[in-house]
Amino acid sequence: MEPSGWLTFDVHAVAEALEISVDDVQTYFTDGRRVSFLIERRAVEAMPGSELAPSEGAGFDLIDSEGGYWEVRSLTRGGIYFCPSYMVGAGRSFEEGGFLDKLENIDGYFVTDVTQFPEMPYWIIESNIVENWWNEGVLGNSSKVSKSKFLNLIDDV
């Protein structure tokens, strides 16, 4: 699958607007944890008629023009995970039932390769594709895959 589109940024304009260095912009915008909130807002523009979830605590990030729910995820040097964010991090654990519930309750994922900043490809991937990957055993045991594995998987879609 080719990228669904590209999110582009003017690094120098961002640095000037934020009054930080170009190097700091590069560092910030390639860290999925830090840039995710901005990517969510750009995803709204990329999916016409969509809007942000009503709160940060919602089980999704975007609502599309037809009322479908979407998760926004960043593909980083460390890879990407598809399970709910409450299952990722220190002291947290993966639970297959919660992951499968997530897949049933969302329409899919808006995945952006933040490592390519300032011209970042994104893919709009329906949840049934991720569910197929899980059922085929190609996702890691916690639904995480490396960047190279994700790119190989998405190339085959």
Image: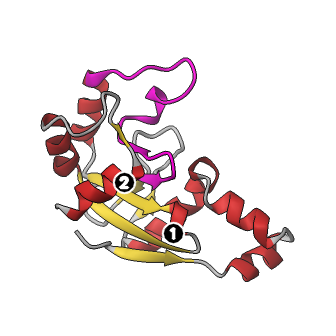
Q: Please tell me which residue lies in front, 31 or 34.
A: 31
The quadrant of the rendering that contains the C terminus is: bottom left
Tell me: 150 left or right of 28: left
Residue beneath the point at 28% across and 52% down: 108
Amino acid identity at mark 1: Arg
Dot 2: few (<14), some (14–19), or many (≥20) neighbours within 10 Å?
Answer: few
Tell me: 152 left or right of 111: left
Q: Is any atom of residue 67 visible in this view?
A: no
Q: Earlier in the sequence, mark 1 or mark 2?
A: 1
Q: Quadrant of residue 124?
A: bottom left
Dot 1: few (<14), some (14–19), or many (≥20) neighbours within 10 Å?
Answer: few
Q: Which span of residues is magenta-colored?
A: 69-96
- Is residue 135 inside the magenta stretch? no
Measured from the top left, where is residue 104 in percent x and y?
Answer: 21, 38
Say which mark, if any, is on residue 42. 1
Measured from the top left, where is residue 16 in percent x and y?
Answer: 82, 78
The quadrant of the rendering that contains the N terminus is: bottom left
- Where is mark 2, residue-wise? 148
